[in-house]
Amino acid sequence: MRIGSSLYNNSINSFYNNLYQSKISVHASKLSQDFFPVNNAKNQNAISSNSLQYVNDIKSASSSLSGVLKELSGSAFSQRTMVSSNTDLMTVNYSGNKINSMDDMTVRIDQTAAGQLNEGKSLSSSGWYEGDRGTNRFTVETGGKTTQLSVNVTAGDSNRDVQQKMATAINNAGLGLRATVETDSKTNRSILKIESSVTGSDEKNSFKLNDTTGNVVASTGANEVSRENRDAVYSINGGPAQTSKSNTVNLGNGLSATFKEASAEEVTISRGRDMDYAKSAVQSMVGSFNSLFSAAAQNVGDPKAQGLASRLVNVASAYSGSLQSIGIGFDNSGRMTVDSKKLNEAADSGRLQQFFTEGAGRNFGFASQLGRLADNVSKNTSNFVSSNLFGNALSENFSYSGLGDLFQYNHMGTGNIFDYSF
């Protein structure tokens, strides 16, 4: 509201300014030490491109946060897709646009596709290597190509030393093979394992190792095949067995499935909520919150921006227990973090939707509380920065019309811009 009398207007502005500054000064030191990086810009009384960017960053981040919170209050959890009844056995991906016409189907996975696996001899890990010393050369045949590799075996090498040298040589050759040395701490025995990343039963997908100089292949048993390369075997809706060289299978109409484990259990694919979409929206919310927090906190010379950052922390801290239960925590700087495992569990159990939609349309709940603040900052950004830090460009249109919102409390009695208790 604008006051006709210049004298009255100056007086009321002075009153709010004095009150605001006195409240801020009490806790500014604590906030600076606990949450805000020290980044006092030089020549703050002069407007600059950095100053304008600072204000624009606050406006942009608050607008983004407001938008994603509105989505999480409802529509993010109404998206539909095709889902798997057992994601431990099979996951699905739907990229079509005719979800309402999609029928349920069942899939049984009799065998997953795999690459060849060689498991060498179990040798005493620390035992003295008894094979040939010096330069040992061996070949790897795969994909119709033969590659020669070599390792240097010294007098003091143990069995595990030689196994590791072979694994390193194979991995560095870029042959599509992954070599590892697995050691059993209880028995102190180690095994060289070599696995192909290419699945499918084609002969060209197999590999073979042979000694040419020395005997490292024979001594370690590196050419002993424990699993042949193979196709996936599966059936749809109880039909005949089908094969695939890959564990990702196109089922048609924009639907694909990825096999993870074979089982006699039939996995059902049906229409359900797209929780990946909702979890992505949560990740966006966290990113927007952190962007707004960082934009407000970057200049400790602006008490209003510090007040905004503090208020963000206050709103979040009022729901800290519930946020942690769905996988959202905070680091030492006050920024949000995400525990993906907890987030997935909360999505599967329904707790994620319950948390974000609680109080939707009735002005309570985390999304409503934080959303109102973000929306106000987006629409009235000048009320959340100190105009005297940026020259007349902001102060000409600056008023205290937004102070009413700054004095509001949330349902737990926290969140007032002058309340800095955490």
Image (spheres, rainbow, N blue to C red):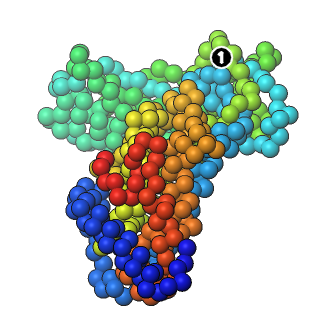
Q: Residue drawn at (46%, 47%), measured in percent from left and top?
A: 410
Image coordinates for residue 267, horizontal then vertical, percent: 68, 20
Q: x, y percentage for residue 281?
A: 58, 47
Above or below, 99 against 113 in this view is below
| Residue at image coords 27%, 67% | 22
- 261 relative to 368, above or below: above
The residue drawn where x is 78% and y is 42% is: 96
Left or right of residue 69: residue 30: left
Q: Where 293 sits versus 348, above or below? A: below
Q: Against 234, is 163 above or below?
A: below
Compare residues 93 and 187 and report the one nearer the observer. 93
Q: Quadrant of residue 239?
A: top right
Q: Which residue is mark 1?
A: 110
Image quadrant assignment for residue 201: top right
Instruction: Classify mark 1: helix, strand or loop.
Output: strand
Q: 203 or 301, which lies in front? A: 301
Q: Amino acid at mark 1?
A: Asp
Residue 351 seen in render: yes
Q: Quadrant of the N terminus?
A: bottom right
